[in-house]
Amino acid sequence: MLKNTQQLLDIMSRLRNPEGGCAWDIKQDFTTLIPYLIEEAYEVVDAIERNDLDDLRKELGDLLLQVVFHSQIANELGLFSFEEVSAGIAEKLIRRHPHVFSDAVFNTDAERHQAWEQAKADERQEKNKTAKPDSVLSGVAGNLPALIECEKIQDRAAQHGFDWPEVSPVFDKVLEELQEVKEALESGDQAHIQEEIGDLLLVTVNLARHLKVNPEIALKESTKKFSKRFHYIEQQVAASGRHLRDCELMELDAFWHEAKVFLKNK
């Protein structure tokens, strides 16, 4: 395995070599590679969701290539090497798992999660020890998908006591925010409507968190379900020799309810 890893590093070094390397690879930098890094991460997720394990192996290789690519650029700039990247994550895993690599004992998942968050907080504090006191919300990447960022921010706040102790008041808050959306709509103020929709989405994420549901996955699955049902509607309309715009909403809605039955176990 070490031989294959070294071969991969050697290949990337050669691709980046100004003498005899690849012109495209040579001109890349951290910023230009961002779209490819994000794309490869999503393709790994797609392979997992399709349960295509052979494709997963390939996509993980493509994602690893991005790590190697960035590490090679950093090495050329005298910043760090792939070996230092590997050593850093190994050290972090050991530090964040004291119940595995030392004598710490956690009796529940909640205790383990609390210790994990505390370790992350200690790391952030160490990194910024010369700066002003850090926020407990620091460290959550601002370019995450909105649902994921919202969940992480709320979870971080909850770890420090800012959370409802049970789910019942969260339901009440969802209804309250929904009513405020209705009131904003009546005002006709588009900026206010957007603000209230945002608040409704935020508290819905909070509800999902309390119910132990990943909001990003839940929405993705619901979107897939919507797409399947809509495709069914398209098929039924096409079979009648018409286009969607030729149908009344009532008829399309009837097809939608048919799709719910027909696709229930598919």
Image (spheres, rainbow, N blue to C red):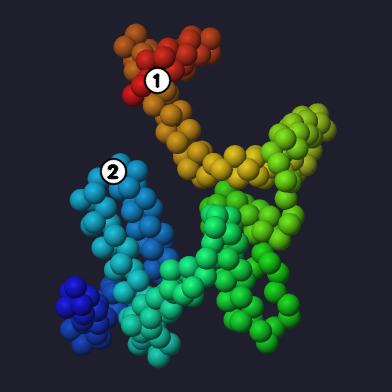
Amino acid of disc 1: Lys
Q: Reading the chain from its start, which is encountered first: label 2 or label 1?
A: 2
85 to 236, vertically: above or below: below
Can you identify the residue that label 1 sits on? 264
Q: Residue 23 lies in what quarter of the image?
A: bottom left
Q: Where 234 falls versus 158 (above or below)?
A: above
Residue in the foreground of this view, choosing between 100 and 134 = 100
Q: Callout 2: 10 Å neighbours few (<14), some, many (20+)? A: few
Q: Which residue is mark 2?
A: 51
Q: Left of 161 or right of it: where is 27?
A: left
Quarter of the image where the N terminus is located = bottom left
Placement of the C terminus among the 4 image quadrants: top left
Query: Are there few (<14), some (14-19), or many (20+) residues within 10 Å of tag 1?
Result: few
Q: Nearer the viewer, residue 28 or 121?
A: 121
Residue under the point 39% across and 76% down: 90
Residue 151 at x, y percent in the picture: 60, 51
Instruction: Give the residue drawn at x 33%, y 68%.
Output: 66
The residue type indicated by label 2 comes to Asn
Q: Quadrant of residue 228?
A: top left
Residue in the image at 64% along x and 81% along y:
128
Numbered disc 2: secondary structure: loop
| Element under disc 1 | loop
Cα–Cα span, label 2 and label 1:
20 Å
x and y, in percent, of residue 236 in the image = 36, 13
Whether residue 96 is visible to the viewer of this picture, yes or no, is: no
The percent position of residue 88, horizontal first and vertical second, equals: 42, 79
